[in-house]
Amino acid sequence: MTEIQREQNRETRKLQVTGGSTYIISLPKKWVVQNQLKKGSSILFYEEEDGSLRISSESKRQERSEEALIRVSSSDHPNAIIRKIVSVYLVGYNSIHVKGQKEALSSRQRNTIKNFARRLLVGTEIVTDTPTELSLQVLLNYPELSVQSALRRMCIITSSMHKDAVTALRELDLQQAKDVITTDDEVDRFNLYIVRQLKMAIQKPRSIREIGLTNARDCLGYRLVTKYVERTADHAVNIAENVLSLERRLNSEVIGKIEKMSTIAVSMFETSIEALFRNDFNLAESLIEKMKNVVALALEAASFSEEIRADESASLRLVIESVRRTAEYACDVAEIVLNLAVESIIK
């Protein structure tokens, strides 16, 4: 709802006293009718952190089912079905049923859905597996794995992926590069889980503390951080993929430049996440200045591209770009921390 819409919907009611000690206020008739309320209906009140009151009807709270049904046809591409499942998972449904409209699900559809659920949906089990239906049940609740715990694990994996990708570059270790690419699934699993938790918290503000955060602003900040971490992992994958395209090791001097860049970039990334968890404004501020060192090293490393073969030159530039982007995402996270921790520097 926009600010203009809020102004148009705003009404003023006067507080009244009845019986000498009971305070009452009337409800807008339009709202009562829309929610199908009548005399004796239950109204729920929630006190928010800023002192405001939020009200909702009991019927409104119960009207949304915990189950979602997705109808598909045999001609639907498996990836299109996966996108529907992800959308339903992210908005908080705990039971997801995928059924064929008139015919059985194809073996390709069923196998794709099952593999996806096992690899990428945290705490989700396949509870029904028949030719015509697949049912997924989300068994993990947020008290069991907080957003901060999931994000910390996601960051540890991402940092390790980047380090392993650069090691694979130095040694031209193709198997290690392939392992980095495979590990990206773990990051994606936690990314989807965190986004699901944050979306559910926004829909039910009283659950924000239950997922380990403080307020809606934290939810927005953590949503952006999660996106940056996931993209940082993607750049580790990009480095690994470029390793696979090389036929020989790069010049030891250029490798040294890239490793130096990588050390600074990963340090910035890890520091930015630590600043987030500690809500440390000064720590976040201190790492932003390091970006200029990464840029300088990137220029030095890129200068070698003119001295090597064209195919190697392209891979080199892509690797340098991915390392630089890792440092830039660390700065993006640091800027979010500055916004979240700004109260700590206000006198």
Image (tube, rainbow, N blue to C red):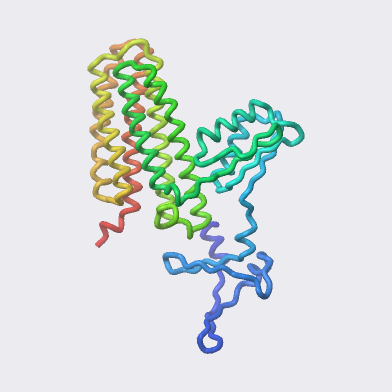
* Residue at (42, 29) in percent of width and height: 183
Quadrant (top left/top right/bottom left/bottom right) for the N terminus:
bottom right
Looking at the image, which is closer to me, 108 or 258? 108
Q: Position of residue 293 (x, y in %)?
A: 23, 32
* Residue at (25, 41) in percent of width and height: 287
Quadrant (top left/top right/bottom left/bottom right) for the C terminus:
bottom left
Q: Position of residue 138 (x, y in %)?
A: 55, 44
Looking at the image, which is closer to me, 341 or 276? 276
Residue 157: quarter of image: top left
Q: Is residue 71 above or below residue 324?
A: below
Residue 14: quarter of image: bottom right
Q: Is residue 299 left or right of residue 94?
A: left
Q: Position of residue 211 (x, y in %)?
A: 44, 52
Q: Is residue 264 above or below residue 143?
A: above
Q: What is the count of numbered marks?
A: 0
Q: Is residue 21 above or below residue 78?
A: below
* Residue at (55, 80) in percent of width and height: 24
Q: Position of residue 90 (x, y in %)?
A: 54, 44
Looking at the image, which is closer to me, 256 or 123? 123
Furthest toward the right, the residue is 102
* Residue at (46, 31) in percent of width and height: 185
